[in-house]
Image: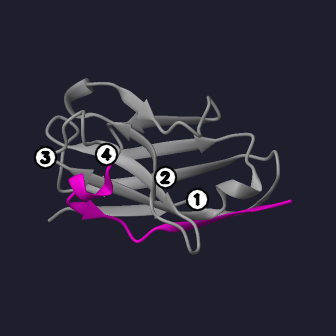
Amino acid sequence: QVQLVESGGGLVQTGGSLRLSCAYSGLTLITSSIAWFRQAAGKEREFVAAIYRSGGGTFYGDFVKGRFIFSRDGAEKRLFLQMNALKPEDTAVYFCAAGPHVITSTLRFGAAYDYWGQGTQVTVSS
């Protein structure tokens, strides 16, 4: 049974940093890709970053512009999204997602992922 549990969200001022964590079980990074998406109130879900399965690389949404770093700790079965230089427009619920059927042309689309966490709220105050 696949489980994804996000943590690390909170309230931060503009320009601050947060590190989100996604603890996973029931899957491996050899066969599954894992991503972060976010959804702000009243807006569509947006791709943030993904680690493609089997060491296939890390990809970021266009808005990231070097501010976020997506990394993993394979031994602990945990992934991290380090978010720096946060802006009010980064305010959203951030979700961890995983799936074995993701291919490079679909990794930016939420529909490609089979498993989702419950999300963690990030609020950036101006």
Q: Earlier in the sequence, mark 4 or mark 2?
A: 2
Q: Which residue is mark 2?
A: 21
Label of residue 8 in the image: 1
Give the label, 1 or 4, closer to the camera: 4
Amino acid on which disc 1 is placed:
Gly
Amino acid on which disc 3 is placed:
His
Label 3, secondary structure: give it: loop
Disc 1 and disc 4: Cα gap in Å?
17 Å
Amino acid on which disc 4 is placed:
Ile
Q: Is residue 7 magenta?
A: no
Label 4, secondary structure: give it: strand
Q: Which residue is mark 4?
A: 34
Label 1, secondary structure: give it: loop
Label 2, secondary structure: give it: strand
**Magenta region, residue range:** 109-126
Disc 3 and disc 1: Cα gap in Å?
27 Å
Q: Position of residue 123 (x, y in %)?
A: 70, 65
Disc 1 and disc 2: Cα gap in Å?
6 Å
Disc 4 and disc 2: Cα gap in Å?
12 Å
Disc 3 and disc 4: Cα gap in Å?
11 Å
Q: Is residue 113 magenta?
A: yes
Left or right: residue 69 versus residue 74 is: right
Q: Position of residue 1 (x, y in %)?
A: 14, 65
Q: Earlier in the sequence, mark 1 or mark 4?
A: 1
Q: Residues within 10 Å of mark 3 (few under 14, many from 20)?
A: some
Q: Position of residue 20 (x, y in %)?
A: 55, 52
Label of residue 101 in the image: 3
